[in-house]
Image: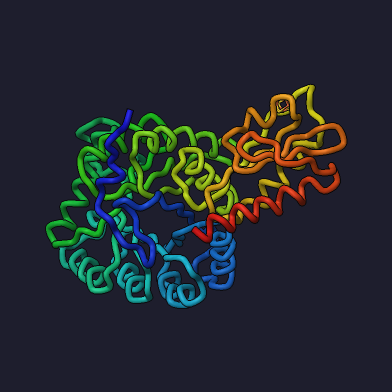
Amino acid sequence: MSQITHRSETRAVKVGNVTIGGSNEVVVQSMTTTKTHDVEATVAEIHRLEEAGCQIVRVACPQMKDAEAIPKIKQRINIPLVVDIHFDYNMALKAIEGGADKIRINPGNIGKREKVEEVVEAAKAKGIPIRIGVNAGSLEKRILDKYGYPTADGMVESALYHISILEELGFYDIIVSMKASDVHLAIEAYEKAAQAFSYPLHLGITESGTQFAGTVKSSAGLGAILSKGIGSTLRISLSADPVEEVKVGRELLKTFGLASNAATLISCPTCGRIEIDLISIANDVEEYISTIKAPIKVAVLGCAVNGPGEAREADIGIAGAKGEGLLFRHGEIIRKVPEETMVEELKIEVDKIAEEHYAK
Ligand code: SF4
């Protein structure tokens, strides 16, 4: 059943050289863990994130010296930079002046009308968007009083309140997040937000936990939302190296067929029919294809009994046999290769197929 998605109907909002929303693919973001004013450490972490496939990076800005570091960081990175500010309009102005590609600030929290206007005018002058970050844990008191506790309706009401402040000032380059650590609440809030307005939605399950538990929780929550056609950008929040956030985000998009710039590994769970050291081969191949920027599917299977047939959708694959491997394309065996060289042979074939995609 085809579904009309919120995703394809949202406003397209430019963040540096990346566009969020409209008919664009879902963009993967992450956030640095360094002190932003430590320029060396921040730039080094951003470079690692870029390499992992992060498309937009956000930095925290708790002090003025963090905002002052923005121009130095901007000079040395290649992906758009988002500056996360709570309340302080002076820092927002400094970050915008310093070249931020987007700021994350809730206009309703800035204070006096003149201050809000100044920030909005500065963002307009530089052509950068503002992300409104609604968080179930920090809803306005009057909304909490009205609903009694954080609800999806309360979160949407909060989003509409902040949106209305920007719209009244003629500002429409808006992105909105509706984060909650409760998965059910987050799903409902994003669904209701998608019906309430057409600004692109930034997805996230906040405080989702450690690398393992947070990956499961974020994937479950964001998977449910993405499958409804909602979400134009996402960040997986993990208590872990942020590179892991990017890896999970990319894998999640691949799972839903939403990433045209990444290769996917298909590997079998292994069983008593296994003929090769599949687990280490699968990890090796997964690492190898992580830098490929084409939507190809690569299979690594433990045996040839069910192997090639089980992975018919693979563009290229290898199935273990006694002392050798069988290379196959779309379920058809193309040749036998010795066990010692089969992984190398597979990588050569992967590169060839990737080249064909790049040439298209
Ligand atoms: Fe077992 Fe072979 Fe299937 Fe792997 S591909 S799970 S080894 S039958």
The image shows a total of numbered marks equal to 0
Residue 301 percent location from the top left of the image: 71, 34
Residue 130 percent location from the top left of the image: 29, 60
Vertical placement of residue 264 versus 79, above or below = above
Left or right position of 232 against 238:
left
Say which residue appears at 39% left-offset and 44% top-offset.
203
Say which residue appears at 50% left-offset and 34% top-offset.
217
Query: In terms of depth relative to the viewer, which is nearer, 285 or 358?
Result: 358
Residue 71 percent location from the top left of the image: 43, 77
Vertical placement of residue 42 versus 189, above or below = below
Quarter placement of the N terminus = top left
- The answer to whether any part of residue 279 appears in the image is yes
When asked about the image quadrant of residue 279, the answer is top right
- The answer to whether any part of residue 150 appears in the image is no
Q: Quadrant of ligand 1?
A: top right
Say which residue appears at 55% left-offset and 59% top-offset.
49
Residue 172 percent location from the top left of the image: 20, 58
Q: Residue furthest top?
A: 272
Left or right position of 146 against 200:
left
Say which residue appears at 38% left-offset and 36% top-offset.
225
Vertical placement of residue 222 versus 115, above or below = above
Vertical placement of residue 2 versus 83, above or below = above
Query: In terms of depth relative to the viewer, which is nearer, 290 or 345?
Result: 345
Query: In terms of depth relative to the viewer, which is nearer, 50 or 291?
Result: 291
